[in-house]
Image (cartoon, rainbow, N blue to C red):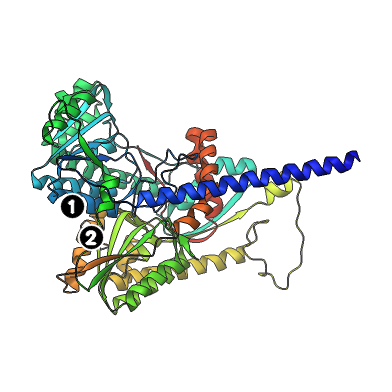
Amino acid sequence: MREFFKYLFASMLGFFLSMVIIFIICFVIFVGAISSIDSDKTVVVSNNSVLFLNLDQPITERTPKNPFGNLPIVGSEEKDGIGLNDFLKAVQKAKTDDNIKCIYLNVSSPNAGYATLREVRNALIDFKKSHKKIIAYSEVYTQGAYYLASVADKVYLNPEGALEFKGFSSELTFFKGTLEKVGVEMQVIRVGNYKSAVEPFILDKMSDYNRKQVTAYVGGLYNTFLSDIAQSRNIEKDSLYSIADNYKVQQPQDAVNFKMIDALKYKDQILEELKGLSGRTRGENIRSVSINDYAKNNTDTGEGKDKVAVIYANGEINGGEGSDNQIGSERISRAIRKARLDDDIKAVVLRVNSPGGSALASDVIWREIVLTKKEKPVIASFGDVAASGGYYIGCAADSIFVQPNTITGSIGVFGIIPNFQNLMTNKLGITFDGVKTGKYADIMATNRPMTAGERFIIQNELNRIYSGFVSRVADGRKKSKAYIDSIGGGHVWIGTDAVQIGLADRIGSFNDAVKAAAKKAKLTKYKVVEYPDVIDPWKSLMDEGTDKVKTYYTKQELGDNYMLYQQMKKVIASSGIQARMPFEAVIK
């Protein structure tokens, strides 16, 4: 009888807990639905309003469609952010909106690459042509934050704050020692001396080739950084270099003395100044609207029947469907075909922000671009990075637009076959045995070293893929294969150099690329449509909910080591033949 009641109570408890969990899930979905409806509402912008730009949020390629974005759940402090697409349209609209009197720019540590920051920066410079003011304020400016803030009419810093201005550094992480300790050998094969994506697995420091290209990339990025700030602040570029090189900004007043900051003020003083700029008196509250809310009001996509399609290729390239943050060859190819077969779409802009990935998936997407180019103009716009496979998918475009600080090129391929034999056999005591019908039946096995014959076969395959890569670039850029090979070999180039050597056509913004596509199609009136369709946010969030919570707690546990953890995960994901950027450098 005791056993009966024990099982009865256990069943009742399980049933009760299941009901509680179901109730919580239903409640979250219900609140999420209400939140989603509310988040889609347009915002009434009062006259004499200040447009508030908080740019510490992520700036992605497209604004995420997250119905749970307003819910206070675990990890929600990492806001979904705003898409560059909506940001640019919103700032352009604010330029001529009589209700918007000025912009308040608040930024301390922006979450975006420098090419994206330059797009944002140039949009703000264009806004100033309306003779409306931009006021920037922060308690702390990182270098990226100051890069944005320097466009403002007035740049203010908290009297006890800090301005980081020290030059750029980049550090790469190497796993050779770790892999040796755990007994894993990464067997690598590559084409190109500069294809250094494999170096973290086989070396303990940068090769001379990689050091050369990283130095050139970081130096080029820094040159653009200094040039843009010098122009905005009317300070000699050499003076800025000296200030950073000698770490002259050590106190807030130093920033004022060197004319990098206009004045030291507290936030209440900034608010009073904003009141004056927006026509409010001392006793009145500031009328403001956030850039996120203001962007919801801007649903204008243009006019006329004709359309220009923007196809977003964002993230690493893989086969399959992918996601909004990962390029799936099937999903992107389907979007390109849809644009090609739509008679109302007269031109296509391929917006690429990708370090590359699967060589096969890249070729699948490239083929769709080639077919589309035969029917209508195709313009490529490269964001922060369009390297290796990211360059592959865009090389066939009629014209390629880059930012000066875009990282591109990296024409090369590599293969990684891990060998876990030492780990499995000598450390864990696991052995393997089997039969095969031929000596290559188990090629690519990971429980033993490669044979010389297997290495020869894989090297030939990589050579074939690289030759095809070079041929596609040569055809697209109208250059000889020998020339493309001479600037290929996995070599990474920044945007300015890419234009000079013929890998890109011109320095230009995302909007410049859209206008060029319309011009090539001889359009004067047109609408802009975006592809691929955004993944159903409900399905996406149900799929990603667990991952978000897991990521949150992993970050909490690992702290500064979280990036190292991510890189180690990529060691496993990098197996097979890849057309991927040779390094993942973080600029500090």
Crowding near pointer 1: few (<14 within 10 Å), some, many (20+)?
A: some
Residue at point 17%, 48% (across, down): 94
Which residue is labeled 2 in the image? 300
- In the structure shown, which secondary structural element does the residue marked by tag 2 occupy? loop
Between 85 and 404, the residue placed more toward the observer is 85
Is any atom of residue 235 visible in this view? no
Distance Cα–Cα, label 1 vs label 2: 10 Å
Image coords of residue 398 (percent x, y): 25, 71
Instruction: State the quadrant of the C terminus.
Output: top left
Q: Which residue is mark 1?
A: 93
Q: Amino acid at mark 2?
A: Asp
Residue 578: give x, y in percent of width and height.
48, 60
Quadrant of the image occupied by residue 410? bottom left
Residue 452 lies left or right of residue 432; in this view the side is left
Amino acid type for the residue under numbered disc 1:
Lys
Percent across and percent down for residue 540 are 48, 55
- In the drawing, does residue 412 fall left or right of residue 294? right
Note whether residue 46 is visible. yes
Q: Are marks 1 and 2 in contact (CB under 8 Å)?
A: yes
Q: Residue at x 22, y 24 (%)?
A: 268
Return the x and y of residue 23 as percentages of the image width and height.
59, 46
